[in-house]
Image: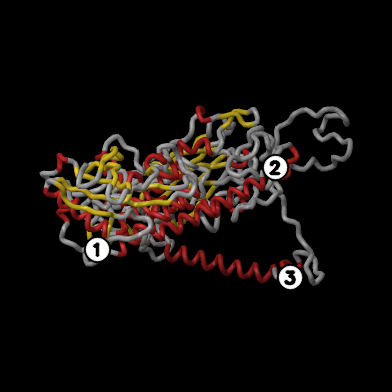
Amino acid sequence: MFAGYRIEQVLDRGGMGVVYKAVDPDLDRQVALKIIAPEHTQDETAVARFKTECRLAASIEHANIVPIHRGGEFEGVLYLAMRFVPGTNLRKVIDRGPMDLSQVAAIVSQVASALDAAHGKGLVHRDVKPGNILLSGDPAKPHVYLTDFGLTKRLGSNAEGLTREGGWVGTPDYVAPEQIQGHKVDRRADVYSLGCVLFEMLTGHVAYEKDSDMAKLWAHVTDPPPLPRTARPELIASFDDIVARATAKDPEHRYATAGDLAEVTSDAVASQQRARGRSAAAAPSVLSDDDLEATRAEPIPAAGVTTPPPPTPPPPPRGAGAGADPGGGTPAGATPKPRAQRAPRPPRPRREPREDGAPAGAWLRRRAKPLAGLLVLLLGAVVAVIALGGSDPEEKPQELGQRIAGKLGAVPTNRVEGSGNAVMRLDGRRLAVTLTSTRLLNGAPHALHIHAGAKGTCPGKEAAARHNGHLSIATHAGGPYYGPPVLAMTTSGDTTPDKSLLAFNRYPAVSDISYTRTMTVTPVVASYLRKNNAVVVVHGIDYNDNGIYDGVLERSDIDRSLTGESTAPALCGPLVADKTATETASTGGGHVLTAALTAGPAARGRPRVCTLHPPFGRT
């Protein structure tokens, strides 16, 4: 017996106390009895924090917060009696592995509701973690309780000493950076912790898997946000964005409330389920050669995605007809000798007659001369601009930003002989990309992606598996090496993987790619590039060297309406930042601007580089 309660068994142990299952004999009901550990009874800070827990937790009445029955001191020992919640806690559920998405959405929603109620009273939980989230009732649709407000603090209070032990309070796997750094803590610290819990529910492991608590704390402060699709590549890109925003290092960049996080999580789960339903409906029950051939003309249900068109085979030589010798020396009806395959050409668009009856192209011919005159004027203007602002042709303007480069090599076992290079300059969130490649399939689109969040390496031959009897590496097989796609390097338009992952109509469709584009990237992508944890991948292989993306490797592991050849990785290269170039560009602490101070092509003056230092009086 303790304080009028009959103790039956130990339920859990924490860093500050022990929780027992007990019975209140007077009311004949079970309770959870939390008693501060005896070794802490002489610790005045711990005692004060425990008493604070009693008052704060008892002040909140909410369906998802464990009610407090009574709290106080008995024979010099502090205790807290609360409702006994039959069931389990989220920690034990996650230990079984990644969770069902519907269950994830329901749990996040209920925990967020509890946190918003607490935040509305000016309280911050500061220790949101799976062990403090209780699940009761139907396992498929559990009722969720948030418990253990022992580390809360009333906003704006001067009781910081009650919550400081070594500068921060919380659990290393879920603590917000501002708690670790001793900065001001508000409700967004709980949003951060809930984001870490969300990541763990989606993947089955904590956001930052490190060997020590100190390494975990350092990771929360410095490492890029974790990406769930590194462990579960089948998830849509929205989950990466949600976790990244919830766990942003700067509280200003996070969701304003826990409810906002819950809302976007529910939306992402609904989108994932719709996408899964479309994929299941699109996949035929039995695959045949005819099915695989038909996929090249079928629309892909996902928004923003277009099926890669097969390259048109080269036409026969002129004069060749039925029974003619197509090879120049093979009699009609005989088996032709194998010959080197020509690069296939993309089909030309067919000109349609105009509605007014005029033949196609008539409008262009009528206006050819005026257009030609306009073109001459434009060229003259360009030449004038170059002449007036020209500089020494041997003097190149100094490029801004962090230089990041990668050498592209062929992915092993995928029968690619090509190669390439990628050079990027990252200036804040502005990314200038130049990518070249050679010896790829000509006349067919190649998806260009930046992958990040895993090992920052390219897959080796050990990642290969059998596809339709052939040994090759599929896109998802490379995921553990290079991570999920975080940027789609399209030639125009949107660059987010959600909308443009397989937008083949906006990717280069040539063997020798020469790609240049400047785009704005998310803070997550920029962070991975700076951390040398990003890889550039060129997709699309001609495994059996027949000039088309056919069904030799079965269906794509990304979308069942595509062939495996169209999405398999062809070239891959880790992106590594050039520290020397970065340090040179940042010398002086300001932006480096290059001004061409010449009057024209005849001038021999050389460009002068002006480094602007804030304040601008010191230039």
Q: Nearer the viewer, mark 3 or mark 1?
A: 1
Q: Report which residue position mark 1 lands on.
A: 614
Of residue 254 and residue 297, the one placed in the foreground of this image is 254
Q: Is residue 481 above or below residue 351?
A: above
Residue 58 location in percent, x, y? 26, 58
Label 3 secondary element: helix
Viewer-nearest of discs 3 and 2:
2
Indicate the quadrant containing the C terminus: top left, top right, bottom left or bottom right.
Answer: bottom left
Residue at (15% x, 61% y) in the render: 158
Comparing 607 with 514, the one in front is: 514
Is 254 positioned to the left or the right of 619 in the image?
Answer: right
Give the crowd class for mark 1: few <14, some 14-19, many >=20 residues within 10 Å: few
Name the residue: 42% across, 64% down. Answer: 389
Which comes sooner in the sequence, label 1 or label 2?
2
Question: What residue is drawn where x is 88% and y is 39%?
Answer: 322
- What is the three-letter code of the residue carrying label 2? Pro
Q: Which residue is more in the foreground, 428 or 407?
A: 428
Give me the residue at 10% from left, 44% from top.
42
Residue 1 in the image: x percent, y percent?
Answer: 21, 41
Q: Which mark is residue 366?
A: 3
Labels 3 & 1 near each other (Cβ < 8 A) = no
Q: Nearer the viewer, residue 291 or 505?
A: 291
SS assignment at label 1: loop
Callout 1 amino acid:
Pro
Q: Which residue is mark 2?
A: 284
